[in-house]
């Protein structure tokens, strides 16, 4: 579903690079300077060959004797994301799940930054939550356009998912992380990733 | 990652069947009696051939003229899950995300039922939240064994994910939905599905 046209790096590789960076940051804090691909693989539940292929994709090769320099490697992975570092996200649906995500991201100072949240309930769509300004859903298109928001996070009930998606895309959003338990219809240029928690839980239960 | 040995139905098929059932339940409420594979495919963002293959996997073939009988089809999909209907789940980590998930599932009366929640903070690991009994994490293995819980939901910080996983598996859990931003090491018989929200959001942002 994800296109890699604009970067040349496949979506699954990007996902693993984000994971490696998180693991490597943990090592930096512990003062580790060098690491071998099989050690990264061990932490990432992965194979050493896969790790080497992923790092090759960003033009990075380790020293066979000493392994990869941890700090350098983190810098290389960061470089890949550098051009995207000022991206902004909006969350729609300030219910239980929406609030949990706002709180979680504020705490971790995660990127992209969530700079606006919206709700159809006027009591929720005002003031701030976890440091994020909240707006009524009527303001959706104008705030997204004004703030140059390109990423949307959907935490609305299933019935509202498609109309909110259509509005977001019109206003300038190009990628959506969809928590609503329904598939979205979007043009081919839009990036969508679905996180349907209830379906995932049923699936795990089914196989165990 | 998911094994299908015990059912013969592949993991991705199960995931799609859960989605079809949700879409079909919506149609039942609207009084729709028959539906063609291409109409299901349209709603599921899928192909008609894929829908027919998935339904064949549970031994279901439609009538080419009228399509599938919606009620019958829902019953057939339910049949697949019937043997699992009394499965119970436990959630570990009653923080923001954990509480959002407890609230969400209680509201939807989702299955598997979450019958216990645990936290290392004694203030959180007591009483009830969204109708679910909360316990201190010391009681983890005894409650899981006593209640016959087989599914675990991990909403703890990364550092606690592996030790909590080890305890859950010892106590009788066989499948885990992991929200902690770290991979888990588990024996081959355990089923794990990862939902790393921060990584997913970074990935969507990267491609848009």
Image: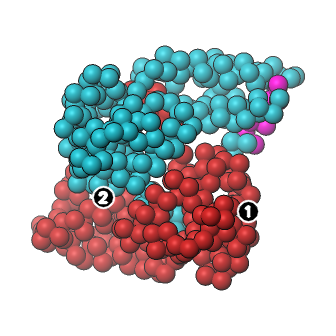
Chain colours: A red, B cyan
Q: Quadrant of residue A143?
A: bottom right
Q: Residue at x 46, y 41 (%)?
A: B130
Q: How many marks?
A: 2
The label on residue A51 is: 2
Q: Is residue A171 left or right of residue B175?
A: right
| x then y, percent, for residue A177 | 56, 59
Q: Quadrant of the N terminus of chain A?
A: bottom right
Q: Is residue B120 left or right of residue B90?
A: left
Q: Is residue A183 left or right of residue A23?
A: right
Q: Chain of mark 1?
A: A
Q: Same chain, marks 2 and 1?
A: yes
Q: Residue at x 46, y 49 (%)?
A: B100
Q: Is residue A130 magenta?
A: no
SS class, disc 1: helix
Disc 1 marks which residue?
A166
| x then y, percent, for residue B159 | 23, 54
């Amino acid at each position: 579903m994800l296109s890699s046209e604009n970067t040349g790096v496949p979506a699954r590789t990007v996902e693993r690079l984000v994971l490696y960076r998180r693991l490597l940051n943990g090592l930096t804090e512990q003062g580790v300077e060098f690491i071998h691909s099989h050690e990264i693989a061990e932490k990432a539940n992965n194979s050493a060959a896969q790790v080497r292929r992923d790092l090759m994709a960003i033009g990075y090769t380790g020293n066979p004797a000493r392994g990869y320099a941890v700090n350098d490697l983190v810098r290389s992975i960061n470089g890949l994301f550098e051009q995207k570092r000022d991206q902004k996200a909006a969350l729609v649906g300030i219910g239980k799940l929406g609030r949990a995500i706002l709180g979680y991201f504020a705490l971790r100072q995660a990127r992209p930054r969530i700079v606006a949240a919206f709700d159809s309930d006027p009591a929720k769509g005002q003031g701030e939550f976890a440091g994020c300004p909240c707006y009524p859903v009527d303001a959706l298109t104008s705030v997204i356009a004004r703030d140059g928001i390109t990423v949307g996070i959907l935490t609305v009930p299933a019935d509202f998912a498609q109309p909110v998606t259509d509005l977001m895309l019109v206003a300038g959003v190009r990628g959506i992380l969809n928590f609503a338990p329904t598939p979205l219809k979007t043009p081919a240029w839009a990036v969508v990733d679905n996180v349907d928690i209830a379906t995932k839980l049923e699936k795990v239960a089914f196989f165990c």
